[in-house]
Image (cartoon, rainbow, N blue to C red):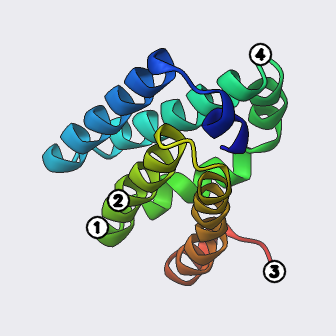
């Protein structure tokens, strides 16, 4: 996010803005699959801008379990809404060129994974080994 805030151009802003709008449409329709896809596209767009073809490929190989939690957490209405708010916060700080706030917004967004994991573990203990 810091790199995008330092080096972002109109094409990045348009692309991210489109992802946010697409997520919003999916949110309004309640389409969980589409919400997940748009969430994924938002992160992929940032990763590919910051580290073309490298970071996303490496990250994608390591995030299978994380994706499972992300899928399950979208079943919670509040989380679906918060994903959009968090992405908007990240986007706005990138578009404003505010490196520190963009980085902080991304860190906060990623930290929610731990929160979501606890909720999913509580609601679906059968998905986890002890």
Q: Horizontally, is 96 left or right of 109 in the view?
A: left
Label for residue 80? 2
Closer to the camera: disc 1 or disc 4?
4
Tag 4, which secondary structure?
loop
What residue lies at 45% left-to-right and 19% top-to-bottom?
10
Q: Earlier in the sequence, mark 1 or mark 3?
A: 1
Name the residue carrying label 3.
Answer: 130
Query: CA separation, marks 2 and 4?
Result: 28 Å
* Image quadrant occupied by the C terminus: bottom right
Q: Horizontally, is 67 left or right of 53 in the view?
A: left
* Image quadrant occupied by the N terminus: top right
Please say if the residues under marks 2 and 1 sit with CB atoms less than 8 Å apart: yes
What residue lies at 43% left-to-right and 42% top-to-bottom?
36
Closer to the camera: disc 2 or disc 4?
4
Label for residue 77? 1
**Which residue is at the front of the view, 72 or 20?**
20
Residue 52 in which image quadrant: top right
Tag 2, which secondary structure?
helix
Q: Earlier in the sequence, mark 2 or mark 4?
A: 4
Give percent across and percent down for residue 45: 57, 26
Farthest bottom residue in view: 122
Closer to the camera: disc 1 or disc 3?
1
**Which residue is at the front of the view, 27 or 92?**
92
Tag 1, which secondary structure?
helix
Query: CA separation, marks 1 and 3?
Result: 28 Å
Query: CA separation, marks 2 and 1?
Result: 5 Å
Q: Horizontally, is 43 left or right of 15 in the view?
A: right
Name the residue carrying label 4.
Answer: 53
Depicted 67 relative to depicted 104: above or below: above
Q: Earlier in the sequence, mark 4 or mark 3?
A: 4
């Amino acid at each position: 996010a810091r790199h995008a805030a330092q080096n972002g151009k109109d094409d990045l802003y348009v692309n991210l803005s489109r992802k946010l709008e697409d997520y919003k449409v999916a949110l309004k329709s309640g389409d969980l699959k589409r919400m997940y896809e748009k969430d994924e596209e938002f992160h992929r767009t940032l990763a590919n801008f910051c580290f073309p073809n490298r970071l996303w490929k490496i990250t994608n190989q390591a995030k299978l379990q994380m994706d499972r939690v992300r899928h399950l957490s979208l079943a919670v209405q509040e989380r679906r809404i918060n994903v959009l708010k968090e992405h908007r916060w990240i986007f706005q700080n990138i578009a404003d060129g505010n490196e520190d706030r963009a980085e902080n917004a991304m860190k906060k967004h990623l930290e929610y994974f731990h929160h979501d994991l606890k909720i999913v573990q509580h609601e679906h203990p059968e998905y986890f080994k002890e």
